[in-house]
Image (tube, rainbow, N blue to C red):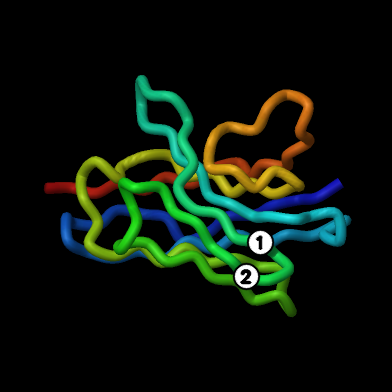
Amino acid sequence: QVQLVESGGGSVQAGGSLRLSCAASGSTYYLTCMAWFRQAPGKEREGVARIYTGGGDTRYSDSVSGRFTLSQDKSKNTVYLEMDSLKPEDTAQYYCAAGKWCGLGLPPPTQQMFWGRGIQVTVSS
């Protein structure tokens, strides 16, 4: 089992920045990728960014590419999502996810994924 604990959400005005953290514990050797997903009210959960825990390769959704940066501290089993130039449409509950799935789409039911409890990000105009 893997436990994920998110921190760093909050409220900010458009154009501002926030940094989210996700610390993994437990059987972290199992993990191939860590990622952030988000879900706004009335919308489906969507992938935002993911990182290969081995090589550090990152991938971003088109909606955040160039504004968000995902990094990791392997010694702490922690990933960081630096969010800059935030827009009101970035408002959502953000979820940290980890497992062997490395896509930005939702993982299929056959893929075991571990999820954090979620953290709110609110961007006001």
Q: Which residue is mark 1?
A: 52
Marks 1 and 2 close (CB-CB < 8 Å): yes
Residue drawn at the location 44% of the way across and 54% of the way down:
60
Q: Residue at the spot x=44%, y=25% of the render?
A: 44
- Nearer to me, 53 or 2: 53
Q: In the figure, is residue 8 to the left or right of 92?
A: right
Across and down, in percent, residue 19 comes to: 42, 65
Q: Amino acid at mark 1?
A: Tyr
Q: Amino acid at mark 2?
A: Gly
Q: Residue 88 in the image: state x and y as whole percent.
A: 20, 44
Q: Residue visible at 59% across and 43% down? A: 103
Residue 39, given in percent of the width and then of the height, sits at 43, 33
Label 2: state its secondary structure. Answer: loop
- Quadrant in which residue 111 is drawn: top right
Q: Residues within 10 Å of mark 2 (few under 14, many from 20)?
A: some
Marker disc for residue 56: 2
52 versus 40 height, above or below: below
Q: Nearer the viewer, residue 10 or 2?
A: 2
